[in-house]
Image (cartoon, rainbow, N blue to C red):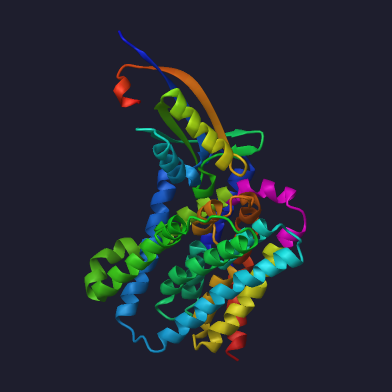
């Protein structure tokens, strides 16, 4: 089977950022995205997701390395200084490369 | 006298979380309850609006809005001047205190009703109106000090088309258009079950407040003191302003409750987007951890006493 290398960018952030993150990802070249509601915790405490201000989301974008890194850089400089954000890149293999230009 | 059972539901949630019970209100149910409460409050207000004369409503709206713009300015001055908190945090907390708590409003109307104290039928309108000024003042102050690009379009969209205002105003409009006769078939769901649903919501509020108490220990002394002093002072101002504007003592008690309450549904999201530098933990600890329970147990009866005294 023919596979094509792409990057999977995963951003876990406060739910208040969802609209902004999705808009930024699209603007920077992502064609599609997936959002889940999640909960979890870290060094700065727990976000149990019990109510509005405590909710977190996970945004996934599969894109070329250039687009994924552009989004990651933008999130690092725009949101990371003031918001709870966890972010990582992973290698992904896609079957239909035209969906992830 | 025994406390209102509604308040006991709040205590149940509070104690359950403090004892680390696994009790949890599912997220979808919480969302549904919030939706129901907002819509029911709007509808009830709308139906009563339809069957009452609206004399002098314009002056009351203007007066209450002026109060809504004044309280966050005073709150900001106190937080910045007395508490020496950073501009961003002061502005964000002021925004929360300028906005209102819908649940506190619902408990206050229940408290008045159970004592047979009448109030103007259209108070739900003021809940919708007062959601906005605090948030606007908070954002404006923070941007005055740190002029930066604000996506005003997105922000105003968030503020005016948040679910709170859409459901309150939408409910008011539907209730007003329907009137009492056409509302009758909806009444069992939206009016008769209201207190039961509110009980569920207060159970959840107890759980949330308990998880906020940990933050309180880290907050120092000034913030809890502010969170107690603000409702007492704003409640007094609200009772006085309400009486001056010609509200009945019951209505003035509600204006006082609205002035004294702090938002934790509409304001946190708006403030989080508008003032990223502000710590959300501070405003939520104050609004939810201290002011909300204070209003529930002490504030509401106190504001009614204020209003009765102001009426002479």
Quadrant of the drawing holding the N terminus of chain B: bottom right
Name the residue: 30% across, 63% down.
Answer: B188
Residue B212 in sight here: yes
Could you say which is closer to the camera, residue B15 or residue A76?
Answer: A76
x then y, percent, for residue B251: 49, 80
Q: Is residue B179 left or right of residue A80?
A: left
The vertical placement of B65 against A69, above or below, is below
Residue B212 painted magenta: yes
Residue B293 in sight here: no
Question: In terms of secondary structure, what is the magenta stretch mainly?
Answer: helix
Q: Is residue B274 left or right of residue A4?
A: right
Could you say which is closer to the camera, residue B310 or residue A81?
Answer: A81
What is the magenta range? B209-225
Residue A58 painted magenta: no
x then y, percent, for residue A6: 41, 20
Question: Furthest-bottom residue in view?
Answer: B312
């Amino acid at each position: 089977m023919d596979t094509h290398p792409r990057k999977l960018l995963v951003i876990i952030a406060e739910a208040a950022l969802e609209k902004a993150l999705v808009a930024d990802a699209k603007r920077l070249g992502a064609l599609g995205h997936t959002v889940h509601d999640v909960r979890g915790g870290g060094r700065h405490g727990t976000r149990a997701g019990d109510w509005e201000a405590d909710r977190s989301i996970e945004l996934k974008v599969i894109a070329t390395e250039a687009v994924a890194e552009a989004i990651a850089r933008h999130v690092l400089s725009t949101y990371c200084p003031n918001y709870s954000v966890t972010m990582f890149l992973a290698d992904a293999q896609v079957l239909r490369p035209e969906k992830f230009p | 006298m025994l406390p209102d059972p509604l308040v006991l539901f709040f205590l149940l949630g509070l104690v359950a979380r403090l004892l680390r019970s696994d009790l949890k209100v599912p997220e979808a149910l919480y969302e549904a309850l919030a939706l129901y409460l907002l819509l029911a409050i709007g509808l009830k207000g709308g139906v009563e609006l339809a069957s009452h004369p609206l004399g002098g409503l314009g002056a009351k709206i203007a007066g209450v809005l002026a109060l809504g713009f004044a309280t966050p300015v005073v709150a900001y001055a106190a937080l910045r001047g007395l508490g020496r908190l950073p501009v961003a945090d002061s502005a964000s907390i002021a925004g929360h205190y300028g906005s209102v708590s819908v649940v506190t409003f619902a408990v206050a109307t229940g408290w008045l009703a159970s004592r047979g104290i009448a109030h103007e039928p259209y108070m739900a309108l003021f809940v919708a109106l007062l959601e906005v000024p605090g948030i606007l003042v908070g954002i404006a102050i923070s941007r005055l000090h740190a002029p930066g690009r604000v996506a005003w379009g997105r922000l105003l969209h968030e503020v005016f088309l948040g679910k709170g205002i859409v459901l309150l105003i939408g409910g008011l409009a539907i209730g007003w258009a329907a009137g009492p006769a056409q509302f009758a078939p909806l009444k069992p769901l939206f009016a008769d079950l209201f207190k039961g649903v509110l009980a569920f919501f207060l159970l959840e509020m107890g759980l949330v407040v308990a998880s906020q108490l940990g933050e309180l220990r880290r907050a120092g002394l000034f913030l809890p003191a502010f969170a107690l002093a603000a409702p007492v002072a704003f409640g007094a101002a609200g009772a006085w302003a309400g009486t001056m504007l010609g509200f009945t003592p019951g209505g003035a008690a509600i204006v006082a409750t609205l002035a004294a309450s702090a938002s934790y549904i509409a304001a946190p999201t708006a403030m989080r987007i508008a003032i990223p530098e502000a710590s959300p933990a501070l405003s939520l600890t104050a609004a939810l951890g201290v002011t909300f329970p204070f209003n529930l147990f002490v504030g509401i009866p106190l504001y009614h006493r204020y209003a009765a005294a102001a009426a002479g």
